[in-house]
Structure formats: C-alpha cells, structure tokens
Image (tube, rainbow, N blue to C red):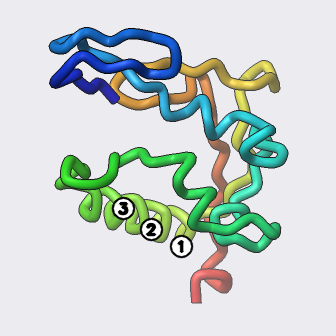
Amino acid sequence: MPLQALKDTVLGDVAVPAGSVVVSLLRVAGMDDRLLPEARSFKPERWLGEDGLLAASAKRLSMPFGAGPRICPGRYLALQEMKMVLLTLLQHFDILSVATASGGVPAERLQFAMAPVGLQMRLAPRSTLAQN
C-alpha cells in the first residue's frame, strides 16, 4: 500500500520528508507469531475468533482493501465475487488437493497483491447425489 507523506514525519526512527512515498507491507504483521499465534498455519477459524483470539483484532492484521476514508471502493463487489466463485466451485466439485508440483511451500510474487506461484488445485466432479 503506497502512501505519500504530506508533511515531514518520523516513523519509528526513520525520518520521512514531505512528498516521499512510503510502501507499507501489511502482510508482515499477519505472518508474525508474536502478533498472531501460529501465523503461518492455515487456520481459517482464527478470523472467526473461535481460537480465543478476538476476531476484530485479528482482522486488523490483514486489511487487503485498506480502511478509513481511502478504503477500496470495489471492496464489496470483490468480496461478493469471491463468494460466488467459491459457491459455484464447491457446488460442482470436491477439492482433492491444493499444492505445488514439488509438494513444497509455494513461492509468493508481489504484484498489485500477493499471489502464490505454482499452486495447483485438483478437483473431482461431485456426484449427482451430492449436488442435491
């Protein structure tokens, strides 16, 4: 998330002159075990607050759409699209596996957003019985 300093500012012990562009890496906090227990583990329930961590504080570690007056105007459309894609996928297929060809951890590429590199998903069509 790039931000531009409107006035001379100090962040921690770093002086940021007015007009400077600072790129904040929001993902770092979400991968820190000191802030989120077992941060690198796949635990979707953590975002629901079921593991004892307050859902609101966990959500502050990951703000993919920003917050406040500069929140992404396409946020709700993007969230709705994600739900529709998942619903359609899971309605017609069972997920057999999600992994890299080597079985290792996928590399990540930073473009506009973080994206896994080489991650493959194997699907199996659901039986007609399972769809009803």
Q: Determine whether 23 is above or below 98 in the image.
A: above
Please, what secondary structure does the residue beneath circle 1 have? Answer: helix
Q: CA distance from mark 1 to mark 2?
A: 5 Å
How crowded pointer 3 is (Cα within 10 Å; few <14, some 14-19, many 20+) is rated as few
Proximity of marks 3 and 2: CB atoms separated by less than 8 Å:
no
Q: Residue at x 60, y 29 (%)?
A: 28
Q: Residue at x 25, y 51 (%)?
A: 71
Of labels 3 and 2, earlier in sequence is: 3
Proximity of marks 1 and 2: CB atoms separated by less than 8 Å:
yes
Residue 36 screen position, x and y as percent: 74, 47
The residue that label 1 is drawn on is: 91
The residue that label 3 is drawn on is: 79
Which quarter of the image is occupied by the N terminus? top left
State the residue in front, 63 or 101: 63
Please, what secondary structure does the residue beneath circle 2 have? Answer: helix
Q: Amino acid at mark 1?
A: Gln
Q: Residue at x 66, y 74 (%)?
A: 127
Q: Amino acid at mark 3?
A: Leu
How crowded pointer 2 is (Cα within 10 Å; few <14, some 14-19, many 20+) is rated as few
Proximity of marks 1 and 3: CB atoms separated by less than 8 Å:
no
Q: Determine whether 97 is above or below 10 in the image.
A: below
Q: Determine whether 70 is above or below 112 in the image.
A: below
**Residue 23 shown left or right of residue 60 in the figure:** left
How crowded pointer 1 is (Cα within 10 Å; few <14, some 14-19, many 20+) is rated as some
Q: CA distance from mark 3 to mark 2?
A: 14 Å
The residue that label 2 is drawn on is: 88
Residue 60 screen position, x and y as percent: 52, 53
Q: Residue at x 81, y 69 (%)?
A: 52
Q: Nearer the viewer, mark 1 or mark 3?
A: 3
Which quarter of the image is occupied by the C terminus? bottom right
Of labels 1 and 3, earlier in sequence is: 3
